[in-house]
Image (tube, helix red, strand yellow):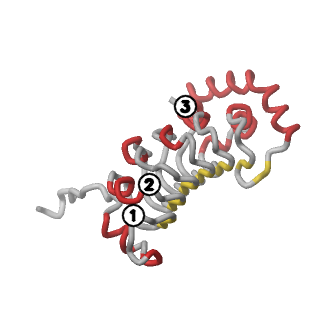
Amino acid sequence: MSLCEPEMTTPRYITLDLIRKRSEHNEGLVSTLEELSLHQEELEAIGPVLGRTCGKTLQILLLQNNVISRMEPSSLRSFKCLEYLNLALNNISAIEGLQHLEWTLQKLDLTLNFIDLDTFADSVTELAALSRLKELCFMGNPCAGWNGYRPYLLARLPQLRTLDGEAIGRSERIRANQTFKSLETELHELANACQ
């Protein structure tokens, strides 16, 4: 291979060796892991290994500061009791693949990703299916620059109790619901302008 040709690399997924390395606190036993931190590993995707090895027991998964661009449904399907998923500081541009976490996921951190207004409505629809989601961190995404970002989320996600570290008050939620139709129209126009 010459110096001018780009080097072909395979995507970096979570491997069994990596899980074992990061599960030293659990004596290297992966099948009973309840918490796993895989931050700063330059991971590009979750892949199938994690769900197959500890999907039945894992409650907390910390994947911040990687280069993950998609939440693939097949990678998340095996998680039976995941309560907290941290995907902050990644390359995610749309929320997808979370429907299998409908009854378990309570906290989701997507701080500083690339979710913009053109994918925001569909991403929020995906979040609306998560009936137990109580805490959401979304700040630092391009969509958070929109003035209607917080009230739109509050109106669409009645199950939320905390957004970006701030408690959601009853009066704030009522105001959000009252302005929802105009926010929805504005978002649609802004999303079309992004495309």
Q: Residue at x 86, y 39 (%)?
A: 170
Taking depth in this image into account, of 134 and 6 the one nearest to the observer is 134
Could you tell whether 151 is left or right of 119 in the image? Answer: right
| Residue under numbered circle 1 | 31
Q: Residues within 10 Å of mark 3 (few under 14, many from 20)?
A: some
**Separation of disc 3 and disc 2 at Cα?**
28 Å
Estimate the x, y position of residue 101 in percent, counting from the top left: 52, 43
Given the current orientation, which residue lies at the most extreme right position?
A: 171
Q: Are marks 2 and 1 in contact (CB under 8 Å)?
A: yes
Compare residues 55 and 156 and report the one nearer the observer.
55
Q: Is residue 56 left or right of residue 173?
A: left
| Residue marked by disc 3 | 122
Secondary structure, mark 2, is loop
Q: Secondary structure at mark 1?
A: loop
Which residue is under mark 2?
56
Asked if one can make out residue 151 in the rendered structure from this viewpoint, the answer is: yes
Query: Which residue type carries mark 1?
Result: Ser
**Residue 7: horizontal and vertical position, in percent?**
21, 59
Q: Residue at x 57, y 51 (%)?
A: 110
Could you say which disc has been placed on residue 170 in the image? none
Relative to residue 155, is residue 27 depicted above or below?
Answer: below
Marked residue nearer the N-terminal end (3 or 2): 2
Labels in figure, total: 3
In the displayed structure, does residue 12 sit left or right of residue 181?
A: left
Q: Nearer the viewer, mark 3 or mark 1?
A: 1
